[in-house]
Amino acid sequence: MNRDAFLSRIRQAVQAGNTAPTPPLPQRQPSLGYQGAGPDPVSRLRDELTVAGGVFHRAASWADAFAVVLQLVRDRAGRRVILGLDAPKLETILLAAGVEVHHPDEPGTYFDADIGITGVDAVIAETGSIVLHTRPDQPRALSLLPPIHIALADKSKMVADLFDLFPIATPPACVSVITGPSKTGDIELKLVTGVHGPGEVHLVFVDP
Amino acid sequence: MSMRRLLFLSDDRRINTSRSPTSARFSITVPMTTDYAKHEHHDFLNAQAAALTNVPLQAALTRLTSTLMAGNRRGYAALVDSSELRDHAKAIKQHALAHLDHYIEKLEESVHRLGGKVHFAADADDARRIIVEIAHNTNSRRIVKSKSMTTEEVHLNPALEAAGCEVTETDFGEFVIQLAGERPSHLVAPAVHHTRESIARLMSAHTGENQPDDPALLAKVGRRLLREKFRVADMGISGGNFAVAETGTVVLVTNEGNGRLTTACPRVHVALVGIEKIIPRMIDLPVFLKLLARGATGQTLSVYTTILTGARRPGERDGAEEFHLVLLDNGRSRVLGTPFRESLQCIRCGACLNACPVYRRVGGHAYGGVYSGPIGSILTPLYDSVKENVHLPHASSLCGACVAACPVKINIPHMLIGLREMQQHTPGTKSRGEKWIVWLASHVLRRPWLYRLATRLTRLAMAPMARAGWIRSLPGPVAGWTAHRDFPAPASRSFRELWPSL
């Protein structure tokens, strides 16, 4: 069926069903459903991320944060790392430790990478979520294909509530809101992580 | 509204049982048999009886629905003003549906602005044809799918396979279902009716290797198999949890990440979205996101919320280069014009299934349609056939647990009663026995002397059957009642007889 016939059928149905005065588009009071993050947002972020199965690391400085990342890469025997974060110092540290460091613009690296390292566009304390916008230097695969995802964030990126993320003024091609590692309960409701996306999600949070 | 009358809340508050309480307003004038669902069966009674004696299924259903219902209650309890937020979500949906023509045009304009293409599928046949054409035009042979009920609804996979495409379901549960050649039995847990043993058997047969029945290992095998599919896929097909008219955005909510992979890896992304999934503005999205996961599982958010606005932008390294939005009517516009419009508010979270004392025992396959549980008992008769699905509106105790669980407070019992009423206006579904009983009752209830006489006669007739206050078996047409439970014997004196001495 063509577009106009399709729409005219909808229009007729809308009119036939609109017997009472039609409801206006409701405006939400800012407080409605607004959970917030309570008196200690960082603790809330940590707790929610932990409940979702992620791992929260607090760092006092960026240098500290890089040390945490290096430790994680070593502990997990990560060989190939994709660094989707403009942090020459971190790259130097990883290279010095003998880690293969790749950049997001290198073709064909994602399916074989061990660890993806990203920044964040936001973190949500209410839900323990990491928010990533796509950009040329921040492809979707970074936080998706490698079995381990490490995100680095500083405190300025934290919002209290999911509502604080909206409206997204000019939405990029993809906004990913990531809340913990990939999960499935499809086999007898037994929780299994890492079925498609990363099985491990680490948030290294710089909070001086 | 006529719905109120169905609950005998007519404006004059008189209960009139001698005539039908509604006019023909509940009948739908267009023919009800459509290509909506090539249902699996119309045999609810036998299917539910089989389900009740299926021991592993009973265990699986109890485990799933109890866990998810506990999550639903916890989720709502932890959210401030959850009841008011659900009212707000409902109001947004009501508004969107009351101006759906406007919002479809707006969505179309927004998708065009970003270089996407919008297709209009009036029915299942259209949807299949359009998507096969897109596959053909883009030279897509290998197709991956993320979990989508609309593609189940239009029976897309066989059409694509007939056109020479390889189609792989990538949600783990859907993958299992595809291997088994079955249909999902729950909205969010499609393979709930499978055990670890049956999944291991299916995956062993598929891989040709013996797979252990360990969930973590099975999932690992699934990951490995499906990664290969993602790596080489030409086209990804998804549904859409929400479509934002203002921005042309399609939102996918998953826990595994199959929605992300399906839209990140292949060259082409096709989203088949029901027209009722449209919400007006981006700021409406968090309202629904807050309720969807809480209603479905009790999570604050599902693991992945993927907010897609158009195809890959210049300079970007991944994401589909081409975006096609296929808007699906397939009977929805017909329901939109009736008092059953409220059913179009459904966001497919599965909360009503988990809450329903009937679904919790009989499982999804007993319902025979694509959608099961309380919402399926409304959708299947409306979209498939009222006449062929006579038992579904009655597969409910009208207890209201579904409304209490629903994130958008759809009054499901109300509509089930509406469908029962509609059966009375649909040739071939009227029950003569029921009509005769209602006629009889109306005559007896309007004459106190006759009522008194009838109760006395009933008591006399039943007395010889009673043992210790209970009747084990009743005769004739009421034998069905005592087939599964005892019937209490009438008291020696009725309440009306006791009343003067109280």
Image (spheres, coloured by chain):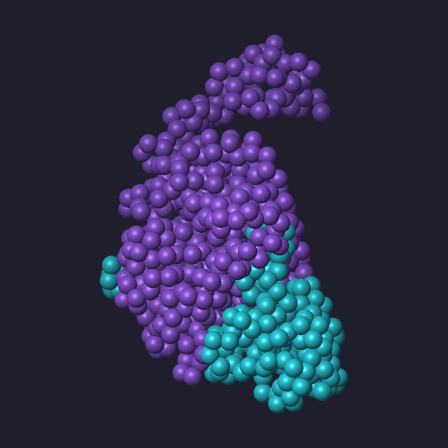
How far across and down, in percent of the image, does residue B311 sit? 40, 74
Which image quadrant for residue A69? bottom right
Which image quadrant for residue B326? bottom left
How far across and down, in percent of the image, does residue B174 sit? 48, 52
- At x 64% / y 70%, what residue is drawn? A201
- At x 58% / y 14%, what residue is drawn? B462
Q: Nearer the viewer, residue A7 or B81?
A: A7
Q: Colour of chain B?
A: purple
Whether residue B335 can be seen here: no
- At x 34% / y 48%, what residue is drawn? B36
- At x 53% / y 56%, what residue is drawn? B222
How far across and down, in percent of the image, does residue A148 sit? 61, 70
Give the chain letter for cyan.
A
Question: Which quarter shows the C terminus of chain B?
Answer: top right
Whether residue B431 can be seen here: yes
Q: Is B127 on the left or on the right of A105, as rendered?
A: left
Q: Nearer the viewer, residue A95 or B45?
A: A95
Q: Is A29 on the left or on the right of A18, as rendered?
A: right
Say above or below: B326 vs A167.
Answer: above
Q: Nearer the viewer, residue A166 or B189?
A: B189
Say above or below: A186 vs B264.
Answer: above
